[in-house]
Image (cartoon, coloured by chain):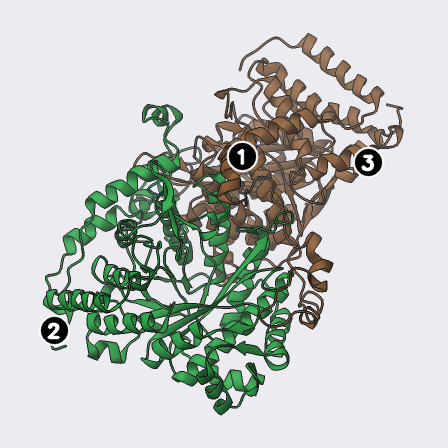
Chain colours: A green, B brown
């Protein structure tokens, strides 16, 4: 690849970018949020130490199964773990020593440097829903996702400034063979947006395609010296890691790229039913994968993941936005900071089938606790419906509107003399009003978060405009956004190289639907 | 009043109470919540001190107007304030000295002692919306509230266990003359529920009726030695206190009862546009009223109130659930604790006209920040729609369902060996499942909050049941609750005395509509 860096070879488009961002629900469009408000000390140090100790005890005594990947077992053996069969038992010091090389924070470089995100520390990055086979919108209802849906969702994510990251499987493009769809998804993320994104993990060759295409997109110089792509993998809870995880670590971290390891635990099924125990197990599972990434490549970016859901006590169905996972969002944030690891957790989660009151209440509580907990990278922060089975078009733009509010909250408010309004009473008497006062005028334009989809009109105005509820307004908004979409500029040579790669790979792959 | 205490003279009805509570969204029905999770230190001590200093500076330099009540001015003069015209200026030490007699926490005694609530300290009490002229439900839409609506809302509040307190103007009974409706409202709160409630404040004689009827209900012994009723008053922001406030203080606190003083500030209109300044002004206004209650009667229960709303920057309309008021909920909680005063703030607030996604998102963020902020008494915690103009029947039961979740969160989770699941792995191997394990069975029944109105069924089940969104399910639920309603037992002699009081007062009052 001798072509110039994409960021220097293309014309900049500041005007069109500004106009997009002004539609996106916030006045400004930071590439990510850097928190200035303090963390919430939800659990005390003793409780945190007990959970951490239990996690290390699980790793040492019960151990973790590493299945279907003898290479992983041999790496563990060489690192000093105790191996019996496929069981890997590790002393706390081994895990701590291995994790010492994992960066506390790192930058994921986007092809547009202004979109690069900092993950870890005080930084918080929001990405859309991941993995839904279905999509839903207000007119067409719920159906399997297609590549057309996928393209539209990537475009919308590009336009919604509170979403800093493009994620990956924003919906499953179910009309494309499973063996090939990762190529189409990668091409879309690389060309329809200039926000950073994740790569495929479901099979080793797909991870390799992701890394190879990222190398083409960014060029070898940037690729070799930066994290430009990450894979997101789940452990097989309880306490089991399969080759999808170890091979993804090998491919991504082996190439100097990043990995997110997320135990997805339905408490009472894949983990104990009590919150403290479920958090402990999740921590153990994520830590062992984190340690493994550092065996593969010391210094590789690693994100500790956590995804706990509760259960309907009558049916056993997973529930979302309930108080137990809310609390776990706050607790795992504290645990990740103790361990100096970036954290992925939470999201705007709900069991609701549509973007109704239930969806919003569950999503808001789930996401506000995620935000307060300090999660550094948040998948599912917009668009999640039906326990993750469906991506909602209306839900995507509605959630993004609330993410903008959380960004404002994460920046806090000032208490200097000007913010305290010491001068505000010079021209306002008791019983008067502040509407035209100098202090108000000086601060008015950026005093309040402006939500795009919250209607604050009078009932009469609202009725005159058709008595549209939030879903109906959201439907109009995402349709308008798609009409306004403009692709971000891209270096033509690199785009051609990516398209060529996809065409060549597709030609060699059979159409497989599994 | 020689009749026996109502609690001893009536048959107890444990069976019917249990059956009501099992419908109410939580397994248990505490009379109030006692928080075991820590507070969130949102602002640091320096910022808190700056806000507090600015509040005291406003009281000392600009001062507060006390209008239409010369008696209040003479009380202030006697207490040592500087009076010029109707302006009252007070030194910080005067305010601090006066507030030193206000209790940090107190019990509001309910006619059923099991329903008495503890207000202040670690305790948190939830009450429904207050003051809406309109009501809305899914079938009949939005219309003026009537006494029939009012009765139904009091009954529903009685049945919803996450609501600990009956509030007062759950909707305005607009079919009853303004001069008389407080009597009907009081009678309803005193007979249709045995939860505690507030009294009228709009005119001195109405406050006096409230106190007189509370004395009849509780009997003189209990009345004279306890707080059984409180008035909730608003200052006339900015920096103005009218006789509604001072006379309510005289009547309620003069009789040893309680007062809540709430600056209702639309930032940028009735207060400065910056958050820190609006909080400072609100604090100043609430503190001066609190100090006044202690002049009237040292030791009178006083609740420091706060209600800040933000503004739509284009229309000037108030907005709710936005990040600025969310942050103020957290900050004012810290300020109230520094001053050792019980706090009323927040609520499940929204500008939405219907119980849609907007309503739920704004309400959830508003209420979760209220809960985390530690508000001790929360009006508007259920049923608020349309910026407080309408009480929603569906919204009432939907909000209550989420309040139950917050109760669980406020109790936190344990991290002892059992909660950590140390024994859980004795009968579960890596790759196994916990569904039938001994640890799961031991904890299953109370492991998770059970929301009444959150649907976690599969799409197929949900469609089979009519594809009902949350509003539709809520409509069915409140109608069922009203069918199941049973009045709590009441001493007949006291009920007769109350009815007699109302009849006599109504006979002397003209029908006035203002």
Seen in the picture, residue A179 relative to B306 is either above or below; the reply is: below
Image mark 1: chain: B
Front position in the image: B122 or A90:
A90
Q: Quadrant of the C terminus of chain A?
A: bottom left
Q: Mark 2 sits on what residue?
A: A4
Q: CA distance from mark 1 to mark 3?
A: 34 Å
Mark 1 vs 3, N-terminal side: 3
Disc 1 and disc 3 in contact, CB within 8 angstroms: no
Q: Position of residue B313 (x, y in %)?
A: 32, 40
* Local secondary structure at mark 3: helix
**Crowding at mark 2 (Cα within 10 Å: few <14, some 14-19, many 20+):** some
Both marks 2 and 3 on one chain: no
Q: Mark 1 sits on what residue?
A: B465
Q: Position of residue B324 (x, y in %)?
A: 42, 48
Both marks 1 and 2 on one chain: no
* Local secondary structure at mark 1: loop
The answer to which image quadrant residue B17 occupies is: top right
Seen in the picture, residue B130 relative to B452 is either above or below; the reply is: above
Image mark 2: chain: A
Image mark 3: chain: B
Q: Mark 3 sits on what residue?
A: B14
């Amino acid at each position: 690849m001798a072509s110039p860096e994409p960021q220097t070879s293309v014309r900049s488009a500041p005007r069109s970018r500004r106009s997009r961002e002004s539609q996106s629900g916030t006045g400004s469009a930071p590439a990510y949020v850097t928190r200035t408000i303090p963390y919430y000390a939800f659990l005390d140090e003793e409780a945190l130490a007990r959970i951490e100790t239990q996690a290390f005890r699980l790793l040492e005594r019960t151990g973790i199964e590493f299945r279907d990947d003898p290479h992983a077992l041999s790496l563990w053996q060489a690192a000093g773990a105790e191996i019996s069969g496929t069981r890997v038992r590790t002393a706390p010091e081994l895990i701590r020593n291995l994790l010492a090389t994992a960066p506390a924070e790192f930058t994921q470089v986007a092809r547009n440097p202004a979109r690069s995100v900092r993950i870890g520390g005080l930084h918080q990055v929001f990405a859309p829903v991941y993995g839904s086979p279905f999509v839903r919108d207000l007119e067409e209802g719920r159906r399997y996702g297609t590549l057309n849906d996928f393209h539209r969702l990537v475009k919308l994510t590009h336009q919604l400034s509170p979403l800093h990251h493009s994620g990956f499987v924003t919906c499953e493009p179910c009309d494309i063979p499973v063996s090939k769809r990762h190529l189409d998804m990668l091409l879309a993320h690389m060309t329809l947006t200039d926000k950073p994104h994740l790569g495929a993990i479901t099979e080793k060759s797909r991870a390799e395609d992701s890394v190879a295409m990222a190398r083409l997109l960014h060029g070898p110089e940037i690729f070799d010296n930066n994290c430009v792509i990450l894979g997101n993998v789940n452990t097989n809870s309880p306490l089991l890691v399969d080759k999808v995880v170890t091979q993804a670590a090998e491919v991504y971290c082996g190439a100097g790229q990043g990995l997110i390891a997320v135990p997805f635990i339905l408490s009472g099924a894949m983990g104990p039913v009590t919150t403290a125990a479920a958090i402990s197990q999740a921590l153990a599972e994520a830590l062992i994968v984190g340690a493994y990434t550092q065996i593969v490549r010391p210094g590789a970016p690693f994100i500790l993941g956590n995804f706990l859901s509760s259960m309907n006590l009558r049916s056993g169905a997973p529930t979302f936005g309930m108080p137990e996972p809310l609390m776990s969002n706050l607790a795992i944030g504290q645990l990740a900071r103790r361990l100096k690891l970036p954290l992925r957790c939470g999201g705007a989660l709900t069991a609701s089938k549509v973007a109704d009151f239930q969806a919003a209440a569950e999503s808001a509580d789930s996401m506000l606790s995620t935000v307060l907990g300090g999660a550094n990278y948040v998948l599912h922060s917009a668009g999640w419906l039906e326990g993750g089975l469906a991506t909602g078009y209306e839900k995507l733009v509605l959630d993004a509107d609330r993410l903008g509010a959380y960004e404002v909250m994460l920046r806090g408010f000032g208490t200097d003399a000007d913010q305290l309004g010491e001068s505000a009473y010079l021209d306002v008497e008791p019983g008067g009003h502040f509407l035209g006062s100098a202090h108000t005028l000086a601060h008015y334009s950026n005093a309040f978060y402006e939500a795009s989809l919250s209607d604050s009109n009078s009932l009469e105005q609202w009725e005159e405009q058709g008595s549209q509820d939030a879903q109906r307004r959201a439907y109009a908004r995402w349709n308008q956004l798609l009409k306004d979409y403009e692709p971000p500029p891209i270096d033509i040579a690199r785009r051609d190289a990516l398209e060529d790669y996809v065409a060549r790979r597709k030609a060699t792959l059979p159409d497989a639907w599994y």
